[in-house]
Image (tube, grey):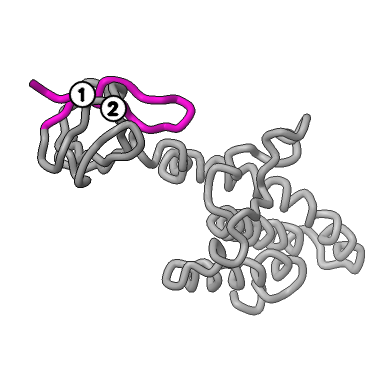
Amino acid sequence: MISILLSFPTNVFFVPFVIFLVIMLVDLVFNIVESVAPEVDLFDAENIPGAGLILPPILSKVPLMVALCVSFFVGTIVSFYLVQALNAVSEAGWMMVVEVVSIPFTAYLALFIAAWLLKPLAPLFDKKKSFAKVDFIGLKGRVHSSLVNQNRGEVVVQHNGSEFLLDVRVIEPEMSMEYGDEVIIVSQNKTTKHYIVAKNS
């Protein structure tokens, strides 16, 4: 079986699969890919017109190494069985031409099968959903900094068992708060992103 995997045209998919699998396993430990090329996304084709016909958009939702590994693994399986079927039909010299022509067909089919297999996993890798957004308006907290005034201040807010350190200010110039004071979050400045607080009386 190994000899078949390493023979043409199956090796076109099997060798890259092994390489990407090793890179992915090493990356799990040392995080190489993200540190070397954090912005690289070879499968980011969402904004290209008609890209869905060439490249399944779902592949842009998963990590690059996972998409490559699964795609080349599927390509290896498809190519393996296709070669077996072709050899059963004929072993003539012209079959080499058929095998060469089958490579892009196999690659295209492998991408869509890989996309179908990875679709259930896509939400797990969605960075936009990885952290839940908390609405702090109306929540109570305690002053964490030495004081809170119009220029600076920090407040610790507890929400669902987690602590959040927020950058806060007060509106009234005469009002100031000290460490340990209980406050309530009134609003958020959309420009500077800091929160406005008032003393919880």
The image position of residue 136, as x and y in percent, is 27, 27
Q: Is residue 35 above or below residue 45?
A: below
Which residue lies most toward the front here? Answer: 174
Residue 198, labelled with which disc? 1
Crowding around mark 2 (Cα neighbors within 10 Å: few <14, some 14 to 19, many 20+) is many
Residue 189: in magenta span = yes
Q: Residue at x 33, y 39 (%)?
A: 152
The image position of residue 7, as x and y in percent, is 72, 74
Which of the 4 image quarters holds residue 124? top left
C-alpha span from label 2 to label 1: 7 Å
Q: Residue at x 60, y 77 (%)?
A: 2
Does residue 76 appear in this view? yes
**Between 171 and 43, which is closer to the camera in this rendering?**
171
Amino acid type at circle 1 is Ala
Check whether the beta carbons of the residues at disc 2 and disc 1 lie within 8 A of each other: yes
Q: In the image, 68: left or right of 193?
A: right
Q: In the image, 87: left or right of 128?
A: right
Amino acid type at circle 2 is Val
Which of the 4 image quarters holds residue 186? top left
Q: In the image, 92: left or right of 122?
A: right
Task: Say which element carries label 1.
Answer: strand
The residue singled out by tag 2 in the image is 170
Task: Say which element carries label 2.
Answer: loop
Q: Is residue 101 above or below residue 13?
A: above
The region drawn magenta spans 182-201
Quarter holding the N terminus? bottom right
**Between 84 and 74, which is closer to the camera in this rendering?**
74
- Tell which circle, 2 or 1, labels the residue nearer the N-terminal end: 2
